[in-house]
Each structure stands twice: as C-alpha cells, then as structure tokens.
C-alpha cells in the first residue's frame, strides 16, 4: 500500500468527562508517556502522508504536546461523523485513503492498521473497512449488523438498537479506513435523527452500500482496541502496558524476581543479564547496561548504570546520575547529576549531587555533597582512589584530589591536595576518670535528696 497516499485522522474532540481532569484525555500518560504519543508512534511507523487530529476543548494542550500535528477544530461535539466532517477543508484534494483513529484508543497495533488498508484494496468494490471486535462484554458498543450473505449491512448504535441487534456479539471499535475520494460526499448524506441526536460516522456503512460499494470488516482482538475513558480504564491500560514491558524484558534476558512489582517507563533500556529484585520503579530515561543488578525498593529516573554495577536496596537515582561499571550504590543513597567512574563505592546513607567521582573512590556512610546555597548549585570533585570518611560534609565548590583521604566527621570547605589527609572537625579532648567521678557525685546527691523527702 502506498503509505504516501494515506491521511490519518485522529478523533479527540470528545469531552472526556469521565476522566474528571483538567488535562486533555489523550495526554494522560501510560508508562510515563501521553497515550496520544503511543498512538502517534504507531502512526509514524505507518508513515501516512498527512496526520490530522480533531480537537475541541483543550486543543491548545494537544497542540503544545504534539507540535507536528495538523489540528482541526471541532467547536461543538455533534458526533463522530461531524468530527470527520470538520476535516473536510483540511483534506480538500486528498483522494487517497483516510484511516480514522481514536486518540483514546492508543494501542492499536500497526499490523491491524495494515490489515485494514489491505482489506480496503483487496477488491475494487470495497469503499470502506470497519474494524470490528468481539468483546467479552459487548456493553454499549455499536453492533455490526451483517446481511444474509455475511457482508456488513450497517452499524447500529446501542441506543438505537433492538433487543435482537443488542444480542449481536460483533462490535464496532470505531476505527475505519475510508476511500478519501468519496468520504465527504457520503458524509453529507448523514442525518442526526437518532437516539443521541448526533451525526454518526457509523452511518457511512449504509450510505456506502446504498451507492453500491462494498464494506469489509476486519476483526481485532479486544486488547488491541481498548479505549480509555476513565481513571479505571487508564489503570487497566497501565497494567496491560506493564505486563508487555515485563514480558519483553524477560524475553531479552532480564531476570525479574517478581515481575508484577517492577514498573517500567516506556523508554527503559535494559541490557542482557540485568537482574531486578522486587519493588523497583523506573521513571523515564533509564539505561541499565549488561549485568547490572537493581536490588529491592529502588527508584530510578534519568539515570545510566554501566556494566555490572549494583544499585540498592533502597537507593534513589535521579536525573543525570551516571554510575560507572562495577560501582556499588548501597541503601539510602541518593544520587543526582553526578558522574561516578568505574568501581566507585557509595554504600550507605549518602547524598551525592552535582559531583564527579573518580574511579575506585570510596565514599563513607553518611557523606553529603553540600551542593546548594539556597540560590545556586556548585560542583564537588572527588579524585580517583580517594577515601571520604563517614559523616563528612563536602561544601561545594570543592575538590578532593586523587588518592586523598578525608577524616570522618569532617566539614570540607577547602580543596584537598592529591594524596593528602584532611581533617576538619573539633580536636578530641579526654578527661581521665571524669565519668566515674561524675557518676559517684551525682548518685550521692540523689540519695541525699530522697532521704529528705
Ligand atoms: C463510537 C461508535 C460506536 C463504537 C464506539 C467504540 C459512533 C456513532 N459510534 O461510540 O459504534 O462502538 O465508538 O468506542 O461512531 N469524538 C469527537 N467528536 C465528537 C464525538 C466523538 O472527536 O463529536 C471522538 C471522541 O473524542 C472519541 C471518539 O470520537 O475519541 C469516539 O467518541 P465516543 O463518544 O467515545 O463514541 P461513542 O459514541 O461511544
Ligand atoms: Mg458519544
């Protein structure tokens, strides 16, 4: 099929009332990415000549989120047929196929779109292809009414259907491929004298047939055409998305100890022999190279973890954390915008932000890079092989040289030379026998007081 002659028309002007949201329905994310972008990824793979989106309220939000789209405005939502009708001017002169998609049905596979286009060209008399499916619960979907010979006669909306028609299991997904040279002519024949008082796109079937054109039906799996209308639908879409990502990860050689407790982002990149323990969350932009282990209860976003490194349990990697090969990040460690070279250890209870740490450095428990003065951020540089004693505060901007040591409990405000030892804390003073004396005097005083009572 010459994709260059296809126009994709995405309907998204519905009010989305059931989401109860200020965010346009098609911008609600699944796997961290707006549902519209999931659909657009597939549309891009189809490579149509034009991609248009019909929007009503909230069109600015959609335009801002998808700047490449041609947006057509449907000021009043008078039905799916009317929604297509408003694209008439924008599509003037387009004689190829028009594939009608729904912005809130984001996971329709490319293979299904292609099957619809093939069906449209399987025989010269086919002018229209409807995507049907057989849902477990046909509910209020439109029903596909077949003629004696099995061909599609018309689509009847649930509201307008008789009991016999409602008993039909084959339903309308809403998606169609239509001969673009006839589309707008057919649409002008549609009326809104139905139960909803709407212009139904589905009435095209009867119109096309009346003109002697054949209508084909392609059947999809229910999961491929699931619409998202409510927060519950959104959660169900997320579950399905996560199930797919987990299966893909395991197929690619990743161990998931308890797959159902690991949450991926749409763009999580996983190497071979990565191992992920239970209860791990991936925000956008994470890459794990081969052999990486992520231990339980870790939260990662915008981070790169290089070969064979180990993260967690209970670790947090924030954007621009870049963890070198073989490094170890332990429990209750937070890392942000920091490049750690290979073999670095940050094993316990630390905050590392706006930092560079050279290879094989050891960062003691409770080390904090003090990167922020309330207004600006500053960098901490720690050299290769350096040793930072526990509970140290490194007040940026500051550099600790290669091979240098920082004594535990130090507050480092000045650069430390390579291979030097820096101690920056109160010097210890001890008083011989003080504790014993103190205990005895205080115990005696207390006994005196008790007697007096
Ligand atoms: C429609 C179909 C029904 C099918 C169902 C599948 C018609 C008449 N009915 O029903 O047969 O089973 O989808 O979900 O087509 N939209 C607009 N402008 C409008 C109305 C709708 O852009 O004026 C968009 C919506 O944003 C949505 C899509 O069209 O993406 C479908 O609208 P919706 O109201 O959900 O369709 P139904 O009437 O439920
Ligand atoms: Mg409707």
Image (cartoon, helix red, strand yellow):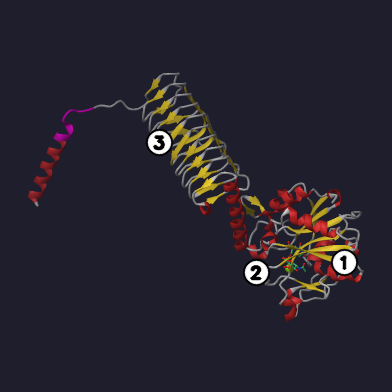
**Residue on which disc 1 sits:** 214
Q: Mark 3: is the Cβ under 8 angstroms from ligand 1? A: no
Q: Report whether residue 280 is seen.
A: yes
**Residue on which disc 2 sits:** 136
Q: What SS does tag 3 mark?
A: loop
In the depicted view, which residue is nearer to us: 392 or 291?
291
Q: Which mark lies nearer to you, 1 or 3?
A: 1
Rendered location of residue 436, percent (x, y): 15, 35
**Residue on which disc 3 sits:** 366
Find ligand 1 in the image and state its quadrant. Answer: bottom right
Looking at the rendering, which quadrant does residue 118 occupy? Answer: bottom right
Q: Are marks 2 and 3 in contact (CB under 8 Å)?
A: no
Q: From which residue to which does the magenta span run?
A: 430-436
Does the magenta run of residues contain 307? Answer: no
Identified at 10% across, 46% down, the residue is 447
**Residue 202 sits above or below residue 442 on the image:** below
């Amino acid at each position: 099929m010459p994709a260059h002659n296809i126009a994709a028309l995405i309907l998204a002007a519905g009010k989305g009332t059931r989401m109860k949201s200020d965010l346009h329905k098609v911008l609600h994310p699944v796997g961290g990415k707006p549902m519209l972008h999931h659909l657009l990824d597939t549309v891009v793979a189809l490579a149509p000549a034009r991609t248009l989106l019909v929007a009503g309220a909230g069109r600015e939000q959609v335009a801002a989120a998808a700047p490449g789209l041609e947006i057509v405005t449907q000021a009043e939502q008078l039905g799916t047929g009317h929604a297509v009708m408003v694209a008439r001017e924008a599509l003037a002169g387009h004689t190829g196929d028009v594939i009608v998609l729904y912005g809130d049905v984001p996971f329709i596979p490319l293979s299904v779109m292609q099957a619809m286009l093939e069906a449209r060209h399987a025989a010269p008399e086919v002018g229209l292809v409807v995507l049907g499916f057989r849902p477990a619960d046909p509910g209020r979907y439109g029903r596909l009414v077949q003629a004696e010979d099995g061909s599609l006669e018309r689509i009847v909306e649930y509201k307008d259907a008789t009991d016999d028609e409602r008993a039909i299991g084959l339903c309308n997904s809403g998606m169609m491929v239509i001969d673009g040279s006839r589309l707008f002519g057919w649409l002008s024949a549609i009326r809104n004298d139905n139960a909803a008082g709407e212009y139904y796109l589905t009435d095209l079937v009867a119109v096309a047939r009346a003109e002697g054109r054949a209508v084909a039906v392609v059947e999809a799996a229910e999961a491929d055409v699931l619409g998202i209308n409510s927060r519950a639908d959104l959660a169900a879409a997320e579950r399905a998305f996560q199930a797919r990502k987990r299966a893909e990860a395991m197929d690619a050689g990743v161990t998931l100890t308890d797959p159902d407790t690991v949450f991926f982002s749409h763009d999580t990149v996983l190497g071979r022999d990565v191992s992920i323990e239970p209860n791990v969350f991936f925000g956008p932009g994470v890459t794990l190279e081969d052999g990486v282990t992520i231990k339980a209860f870790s939260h990662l976003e915008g981070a790169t973890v290089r070969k064979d490194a180990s993260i967690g349990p209970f670790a947090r990697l924030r954007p621009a954390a870049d963890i070198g090969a073989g490094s170890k990040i332990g429990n209750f460690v937070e890392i942000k915008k920091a490049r750690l070279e290979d073999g670095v250890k940050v094993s316990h209870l630390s905050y590392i932000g706006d930092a560079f740490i050279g290879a094989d450095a050891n960062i003691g428990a409770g080390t904090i890079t003090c990167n922020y003065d309330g207004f600006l951020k500053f960098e901490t540089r720690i050299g290769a092989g350096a040793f930072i004693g526990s509970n140290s505060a490194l007040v940026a901007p500051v550099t600790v040289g290669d091979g240098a040591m920082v004594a535990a409990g130090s507050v480092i405000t000045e650069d430390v030379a390579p291979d030097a030892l820096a101690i920056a804390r109160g010097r210890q003073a001890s008083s011989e026998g003080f504790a014993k004396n103190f205990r005895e005097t205080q115990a005696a005083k207390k006994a005196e007081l008790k007697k007096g009572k």
